Amino acid sequence: MAILKLRNHIPISGPARREPADGTESDMRVSLGFEPGWFYKRCGVDFTESWHQDPFYRYDSLVKMKRELCKAFPSVSYWNEDNKDDLATISGCYGAYVIPMVCGFRLVYEKDRWPGKRN
């Protein structure tokens, strides 16, 4: 029986998640992730409601974010500007509040952080 393994993965602008490992990963693997404030400060990406609900705005934002990651960390091969597969995604939408959002809870959106639950 095959031993199934998962590896940590942090999508651009998304919370950490797990994805299948293919066996080529080293035993020591670093996953890099950044808070929305980092992207807001460096490339002006606004994480208010449009980022979470407008796929075109989010895609354009992810292009800017990836460009900034490649510029800030040129020696990290994890991001490749020529690879567009990781830009058309819903990873990170509504932060940790996907289920509450689907259930009708209202969220508070901020330009430089993940949405939060409205009190």
Image (cartoon, grey):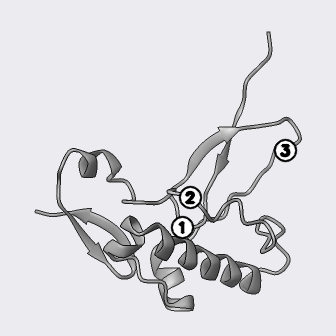
Residue 104 rendering spot, x and y as whole percentages: 18, 50
Whether residue 90 is visible: yes
Whether residue 35 is visible: no
Mark 2–mark 1 Cα distance, whole angstroms, equals 10 Å
Q: At 61% across and 79% down in the image, what residue appears?
A: 65
Residue 72 rendering spot, x and y as whole percentages: 72, 85
Amino acid of disc 1 = Ser
Q: Which residue is mark 1?
A: 13
Say what secondary structure mark 2 lies in.
Answer: loop
Q: At 84% across and 44% down in the image, what residue appears?
A: 25
Tell me if residue 49 comes above or below residue 21 in the rendering. below
Q: At 82% across and 36% down in the image, what residue appears?
A: 22
Q: Which residue is mark 3?
A: 25
Amino acid of disc 3 = Glu
- Foreground mark, 1 or 3, reads 1
Q: How many marks?
A: 3
The numbered disc on residue 89 is: 2
Mark 1–mark 3 Cα distance, whole angstroms, equals 23 Å
Chain-order first, disc 2 or disc 1: 1
Say what secondary structure mark 1 lies in.
Answer: loop
Q: For the N terminus, which image quadrant?
A: top right
Mark 3 residue crowding within 10 angstroms, few (<14) / some (14–19) / many (20+): few
Residue 7 rendering spot, x and y as whole percentages: 69, 42
